[in-house]
């Protein structure tokens, strides 16, 4: 089973995302497990700096500056996602290598066991033509 990176970017505020990106760059700088990261760390660092500057300017609430900040955030998200894929591909399932890159591991999916048959199964015509509503306990 392939080890999957979990960046959790959608749950992070911009300042938290900037800090996470910086931690990843520090962890990957000189990391023997990832000698030639893609994208390169200089590109990621530039995107971090761009987002930091745009975030600072957006604090006045201006729509244009906020839009610019979101555009810079999308760039950093894309780069970090690419970097996460690179780490997954290079680590080849080795969780310690993934963690050495400053990234988290996705939780393993649980295996669904056979479910018991439904009790009190009822069906009736739905609201739209061709719909059937099914209820059970």
Image: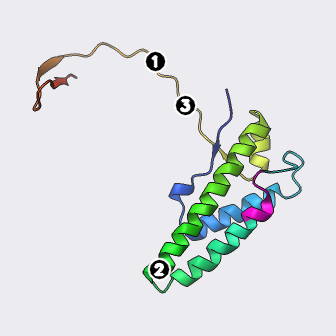
State the CA–CA distance, disc 3 to disc 2.
41 Å
Q: Position of residue 66 (x, y in %)?
A: 48, 76
Q: Which residue is mark 1?
A: 113
Q: Which residue is mark 2?
A: 64
Which of marks 1 and 2 precedes in the sequence? 2
Q: Position of residue 63 (x, y in %)?
A: 43, 79
Closest to the observer: 38 or 125? 38
- 11 falls in the magenta region: no
* Secondary structure under the numbered disc 1 in the rendered image: loop
Residue depicted at 16% across the width and 26% down the height:
131
Closest to the observer: 48 or 18? 48
Q: Which residue is mark 3?
A: 109
> Could you classify mark 3 by the number of other residues whose Cα lies within 10 Å: few (under 14), some (14-19), or many (20 or more)?
few
* Secondary structure under the numbered disc 2 in the rendered image: helix
Question: Image check: 69 left or right of 104?
Answer: left
Closest to the observer: 5 or 112? 5
> Could you classify mark 2 by the number of other residues whose Cα lies within 10 Å: few (under 14), some (14-19), or many (20 or more)?
few
* Residue 127: quarter of image: top left
């Amino acid at each position: 089973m392939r080890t999957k990176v979990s960046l959790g970017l959608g749950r992070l505020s911009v300042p938290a995302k900037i800090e996470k990106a910086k931690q990843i760059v520090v962890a990957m700088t000189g990391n023997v497990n990832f000698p030639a990261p893609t994208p390169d760390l200089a590109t990621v660092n530039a995107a971090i700096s761009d987002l930091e500057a745009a975030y600072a300017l957006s604090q006045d609430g201006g729509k244009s500056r906020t839009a610019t900040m979101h555009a810079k955030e999308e760039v950093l998200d894309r780069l970090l996602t690419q970097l996460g894929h690179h780490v997954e591909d290079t680590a080849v399932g080795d969780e310690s290598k993934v963690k050495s890159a400053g990234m988290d591991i996705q939780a393993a999916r649980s295996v669904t066991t056979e479910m018991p048959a439904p009790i009190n199964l009822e069906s009736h015509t739905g609201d739209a033509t061709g719909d059937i509503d099914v209820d059970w306990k």
